[in-house]
Image (cartoon, rainbow, N blue to C red):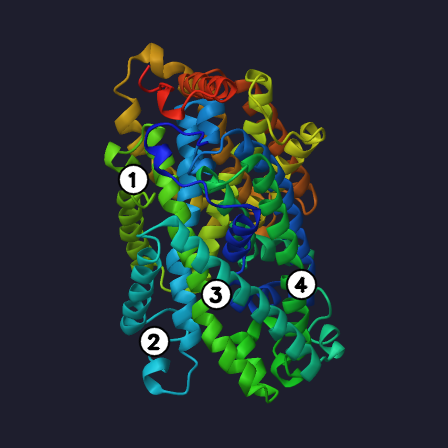
Amino acid sequence: MSTERGSHSNYRRTLGPVALTAVGLGSIIGSGWLFGAQRAAGIAGPAAILAWVIGAVVALTIALTYSELGAMFPKAGGMVRYGQYSHGSLAGYLAAWANWIAIVSVIPGEATASVQYMSSWKWQWAKDLYDGKELTGAGVGLASVLLVFYFFMNWFAITLFAKTNNLITIFKVVVPILTAGALMWSHFDTHNIKVAGGFTPNGWSAVFTAVATSGIVWAYNGFQSPLNMAGEARNPGKSLPKAVIGSILIALVIYIALQVAFLMAVPSGDLSDGWSALTYKSPLADLAIAWGLNWLAIVLYADAFISPSGTGMIYAATTSRMIHGVQENGHLPGIFGKVDPKTGVPRPALLLNLVIAFLFLAVFRGWGSLAEIVSIATVISYITGPVAVMSLRRIAPGITRPVKLRAMPVIAPIAMVFGSLVLYWGKWPLTGKVILIMAVGLPIWAWYELRKPWAELKPHLKAGAWVVAYLLVMAFVSWAGGKDYGGKGYLAEGWDLLVVALIGLVFYVWGVRSSWRNPTLVATEKEMAEIERAEGTGEPEDAVPSASKA
């Protein structure tokens, strides 16, 4: 029985734990594995191995908070809703905006990755797709065709998407494992760890920066895709946590294997100027060719289309559900909340995201520049999860929680600290630029909210003030912080990390205490109670009035 009313009843609850894990794993293993190993090594050297582990720990900690929320509210676009439930429109909108920016920009990033890999083919027309820094006009044109394909695959039905994605995910898992094994078998030079500055050639701060900006956060961010498709999940209380946690752990093993394989397969002569000087256009394929694995290079060139395309298809699906969620939060026109009753696809939202994906592709034409923006925006979107999960335990203890961890009172503040640290590790001025992008979305919120009476608007502003203050304080600390992280050096090394951790804890406490039983939460509680009564009496679902119709 569906747990949504109105347009949500048009979604099809057809995705089980295997399909949802495939969604999560398919989102995580996209373009990141094709470029992430080289980019992380370029920043942190061999210590990039630890960066992947740290990234997984951060993602897993934050994912645990969202697993409880996703099981509580199994609605499409889940990640953009939780802040609205706990704190009202301002905090909810900022969280939704950051999350949407982080996810929708991944879609052109995947298309860019495919074309960028293609540019290392031997033909001149392929080489002309990428100039070494960004896609050329021809490259953008080809990437645009891929974008249309991603959205086309989502246009007809969720079942078509699920079947296609399951097959693609199998290929996406097999090829990275095959690549890591083949490279390790062909050339495994442990001496590479000692040359070019040793294990940590750029210090430990570089390891942390690699977590934030090399595409690691981008990669693990795929854990939220099952949550955004919760409206189509069978038995979400069990299937969502399995999908979220399982996809992160499987991906961690694969990414570590790939990173180790890359580090040991680089010819020693290419390290004369250090890890940061590596300029492979198609890193893993170039190494395969270097060691005579031409068959592997061909497989990688093929997978450079399949892996990113699979992820692009998933994100095209999940972002359309996010737009639906934003519309139901009251911050977009009603047309973007419409779901086609025959296919179960929110087609207007799908079209809007296609337009935005084209805009991102036009502005950010290189995988690296997109990876940086996506990573920091992702971290900003994370901060409301730990606060929301404990806030809702405080203000809405009666809501059924299919997933409820006893350790959440400890996990949630740790997740907030981790998110704050990763945001700081992103380095100034990148952190400031992305926080500015967050501010760009405020006029949309103002258009819908500032027309309300002051008495109605005031509690939303009061409850959301902590998010605005947090972003301003983090921008200032990033500017004033340690020089290793792009700051002015007013905070000494080591002390800056302690300050950021304390800031995370202070705003966590402020955020939890600011939560309130706002109208969205009250309406949702009423809706959920009606559903439970209907399930208890066996009353047909269509006979239960929706909260919006009451």
C-alpha distance separating marks 3 and 4? 18 Å
Task: Reply above or below: 340 against 456.
Answer: below
Residue 28 locus on image (x, y percent): 54, 56
State the separation of the CA atoms marked 3 and 1: 30 Å
- Indicate whether 549 appears above or below 308: above
Amino acid type indicated by mark 3: Ser
| Quadrant location, the C terminus | top left
Cα distance between the residues tagged 3 and 2: 19 Å
Callout in the foreground (3, 1): 1
The answer to whether the residues at label 1 and label 4 have Cβ atoms under 8 Å apart is: no
* Three-letter residue code for mark 4: Ile
Q: Which mark is residue 129?
A: 2
Q: Mark 4 — residue?
A: 256
Distance from disc 1 to disc 4, alpha carbons, whole Å, reads 43 Å
Mark 1 or 4, nearer chain start = 4
Q: Residue at x 34, y 37 (%)?
A: 10
Provide the secondary structure element on which disc 2 rests: loop
Q: Earlier in the sequence, mark 3 or mark 4?
A: 4
Amino acid type, callout 2: Leu
Looking at the rendered image, the disc whose residue lies closer to the viewer, 1 or 4, is 1
Mark sitting on residue 307:
3
Q: Residue at x 42, y 38 (%)?
A: 77
Kind of residue at disc 1: Pro
Check whether the beta carbons of the residues at disc 3 and disc 4 lie within 8 A of each other: no
- Quick one: label 4, few (<14), some, or many (20+) residues within 10 Å? some
- Pick out the residue farthest to the top: 455
Seen from this angle, which residue lies furthest bottom? 292
Q: Position of residue 36 (x, y in %)?
A: 55, 64
Q: Which residue matches tag 1?
A: 341
Above or below, comparing residue 68 to residue 283 in the picture:
above
